[in-house]
C-alpha cells in the first residue's frame, strides 16, 4: 500500500532539518509528530501576525506604565489555541502524546519574537500544571474545561503559579532548603477548608490570572511535611494584587505581588493530599517545566542570532560585517550553541513525554473520560473525587503509571537543560550586543531587548545555582529523589 505523504509547512521543514530526531520519529509516528509540527507552525504564524509587529511597542509602553497589559495580544493567542497547550486532548486541548515536545518547541518558537509574550502564555501553562496531576482531577472538567471553552470565544482565561515568598524564593523549590526556609505565608486549617494569610511575590501573570495554584505550609514550623497546593480564584474575598514590579525584561508578562488576607479556600480546592505539595506540587511540576525554560532561553538565542545576522549583512562604511571571518566564526558559534541547547531541551521533552504521555494517554484515563461530562461534573462524582478514597484511587493511578525513578531522572534532565540553555543564551546575547556596539539600528534594538529578556531565565524556575545543585544531588550525589504520594 502506498503511504500518503502529508505536506509539511516551511516551519515544519525547518524543524525536521534542524532536529533530526523529529524526522526519525516521524517515520514511526507521522500523525503524532505532524501535530507537534502543526503547533510550532501556529506559533510561527502568531509571531508573524501579532508578536513581532507589537513586541517593541509593548516593551516600551510597559516601561512607561508598568500596569499596562496587552489584552489584544492575549486574545490573538486564543485564535491559535496557545492557552490550550497544557490542557489534555481528552478535554479538547492540545496536550497529547508529545505534550512536552510540542510545548517546548512552541515556547522556543514564541520566544524568538518576544520572550515576554511567550512568558504570558507559559505562565498559564505553568499555573495549570498542578491540576494535571491526579490530585487535580476534580478540576479538569471545571477550570481546564473553562480555559478551552473561553479560548474558543477569544476570551483568555489566564492562570499563575504562586510559590515564591518575599523571604523564601529558591528555598521553596528544593526539599533540603524548604525544611529551613523562612516562610511568611501559612494556610490554617478550619472547618470546611483553610484560611490563607501572607504574600507571594514575583508571580508571572499574577495580576491578570483568574486562577492561581498556590503552595503554602499548614505549619510553618514543619514546612516540608505540611507543604500543600491550593487552587485560588482571584475573586475570593481577601485576595488582592497590591503591586506589579518594574521589570528589566519580559515586560509583556507582569511579575506581581499577591496578598492573601484570611482568604478562605474550601477543602475541595486542595490539590491532592495536605502535605504532598513538595512532591506533586513542586518537584513533579519542576520536572516538567524546567526544560521548557531552557526552550525559552533557546528561543531568545535564536532570535538574537537572526537579528544579529541581519545586522551583519547590512553595509556600514562600505563594508558588511558578515564578510569578516571573526563575524562568520561568531555566527557559527551561535548556531552551534543553539543546537547544543536544543538537544538538551529535546532530550528532556521526549523523556517527559514517556512519563506524562503514558499518564494522559493511558486507556484507564481515557475510560474515565468516556463518561458523559454531565456525570463528571455532577455533585456526587465530584464529591467522590474529593473523598479520601477518591484521592487514594488517584494516587494509586499515578504510582501505577509513573515511576519515581523516571520522575527523578526527568527532574535532573530538566535542571540540566534549564541552567545550560539559560547560560548559553545569556552569553550569546551579551557577546552579540558587544560586537554590535552603539549602533542605533532596528536590529540592535531587538538584540538589546533580548539581552534584557534573557536574564530572568537564569533566575525563575529556581536559580541556575539551585538547578546545578539539584542536578548534582540527583545524578551524582544521589541524595534527592522525587517521592510520589502514597495512597492514604
Image: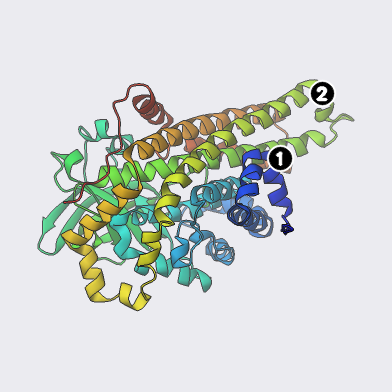
Per the image, the residue denoted by label 1 is: 307
Q: Residue at the far front: name it.
A: 1
Q: For numbered disc 1, what is the local secondary structure? A: helix
Q: Residue at the far bottom: name it.
A: 374
Give the percent coordinates (x, y) of residue 261. 21, 57
Per the image, the residue denoted by label 2 is: 324
Question: Residue visible at 59% across and 50% down?
Answer: 110
How packed is label 1: few (under 14 Cα within 10 Å), some, or many (20 or more)? some
Among the 4 quarters of the image, the one containing residue 240: bottom left
Q: Are marks 2 and 1 in contact (CB under 8 Å)?
A: no
Q: Which one is in front, 75 or 237?
A: 75
Q: For numbered disc 2, what is the local secondary structure? A: loop
Among the 4 quarters of the image, the one containing residue 368: bottom left
Give the percent coordinates (x, y) of residue 376. 32, 72
Question: Residue visible at 9% across and 63% down?
Answer: 191
Instruction: Indicate left or right for 299 with 189 as reference.
Output: right
Among the 4 quarters of the image, the one containing residue 308: top right
As drawn, 64 above or below 412:
below
Question: Residue visible at 80% across and 21% down?
Answer: 325
Query: For the residues marked 2 and 1, what is the alpha-carbon distance in whole angstroms?
Result: 17 Å
Question: In the picture, which quadrant includes the N terminus?
Answer: bottom right
Q: Which one is in front, 450 or 3?
A: 3
Among numbered discs 2 and 1, the one appearing first in the sequence: 1
Amino acid at each position: 500500500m502506498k503511504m500518503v505523504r502529508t505536506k509539511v509547512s516551511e516551519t515544519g521543514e525547518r524543524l525536521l532539518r534542524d532536529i533530526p530526531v523529529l524526522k526519525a520519529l516521524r517515520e514511526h509516528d507521522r500523525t503524532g509528530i505532524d501535530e507537534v509540527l502543526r503547533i510550532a507552525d501556529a506559533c510561527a504564524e502568531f509571531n508573524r501576525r501579532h508578536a513581532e509587529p507589537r513586541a517593541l511597542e509593548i516593551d516600551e509602553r510597559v516601561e512607561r506604565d508598568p500596569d499596562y497589559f496587552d489584552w489584544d495580544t492575549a486574545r490573538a493567542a486564543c485564535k491559535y489555541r496557545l492557552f490550550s497547550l497544557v490542557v489534555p486532548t481528552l478535554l479538547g486541548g492540545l496536550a497529547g502524546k508529545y505534550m512536552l515536545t510540542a510545548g517546548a518547541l512552541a515556547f522556543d518558537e514564541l520566544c524568538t519574537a518576544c520572550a515576554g509574550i511567550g512568558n504570558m502564555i507559559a505562565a498559564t501553562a505553568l499555573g495549570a500544571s498542578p491540576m494535571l496531576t491526579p490530585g487535580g482531577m476534580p478540576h479538569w472538567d471545571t477550570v481546564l474545561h473553562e480555559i478551552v471553552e473561553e479560548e474558543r470565544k477569544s476570551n483568555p482565561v489566564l492562570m499563575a503559579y504562586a510559590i515564591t515568598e518575599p523571604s523564601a524564593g529558591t528555598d521553596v523549590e528544593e526539599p533540603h532548603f524548604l525544611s529551613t526556609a523562612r516562610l511568611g505565608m501559612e494556610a490554617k486549617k478550619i472547618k470546611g477548608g483553610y484560611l490563607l494569610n501572607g504574600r507571594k511575590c514575583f508571580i508571572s501573570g499574577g495580576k491578570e490570572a483568574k486562577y492561581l495554584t498556590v503552595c503554602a505550609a499548614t505549619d510553618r514550623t514543619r514546612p516540608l511535611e505540611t507543604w500543600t497546593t491550593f487552587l485560588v480564584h482571584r475573586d475570593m474575598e481577601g485576595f488582592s494584587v497590591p503591586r506589579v514590579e518594574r521589570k528589566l525584561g519580559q515586560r509583556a508578562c507582569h511579575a506581581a505581588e499577591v496578598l492573601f488576607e484570611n482568604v478562605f479556600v474550601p477543602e475541595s480546592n486542595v490539590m491532592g493530599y495536605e502535605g504532598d505539595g513538595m512532591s506533586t506540587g513542586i518537584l513533579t511540576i519542576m520536572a516538567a517545566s524546567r526544560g521548557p525554560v531552557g526552550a525559552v532561553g533557546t528561543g531568545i538565542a535564536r532570535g538574537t542570532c537572526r537579528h544579529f545576522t541581519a545586522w551583519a549583512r547590512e553595509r556600514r562604511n562600505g563594508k558588511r560585517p558578515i564578510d569578516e571571518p571573526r563575524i562568520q566564526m561568531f555566527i557559527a558559534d551561535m548556531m552551534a550553541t543553539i543546537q547544543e541547547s536544543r538537544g538538551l531541551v529535546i532530550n528532556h521533552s521526549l523523556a517527559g513525554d514517556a512519563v506524562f504521555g503514558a499518564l494522559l494517554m493511558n486507556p484507564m484515563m481515557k475510560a474515565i473520560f468516556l463518561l458523559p461530562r454531565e456525570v463528571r461534573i455532577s455533585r456526587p462524582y465530584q464529591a467522590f473525587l474529593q473523598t479520601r478514597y477518591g484521592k487514594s484511587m488517584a494516587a494509586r493511578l499515578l504510582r501505577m503509571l509513573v515511576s519515581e525513578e523516571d520522575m527523578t531522572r526527568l527532574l535532573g534532565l530538566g535542571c540540566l537543560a534549564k541552567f545550560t540553555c539559560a547560560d548559553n543564551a545569556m552569553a550569546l546575547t551579551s557577546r552579540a550586543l558587544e560586537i554590535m556596539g552603539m549602533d542605533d539600528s532596528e536590529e540592535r534594538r531587538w538584540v538589546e531587548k533580548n539581552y534584557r529578556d534573557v536574564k530572568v531565565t537564569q533566575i525563575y524556575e529556581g536559580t541556575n545555582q539551585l538547578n546545578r545543585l539539584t542536578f548534582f544531588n540527583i545524578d551524582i550525589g544521589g541524595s534527592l529523589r522525587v517521592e510520589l504520594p502514597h495512597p492514604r
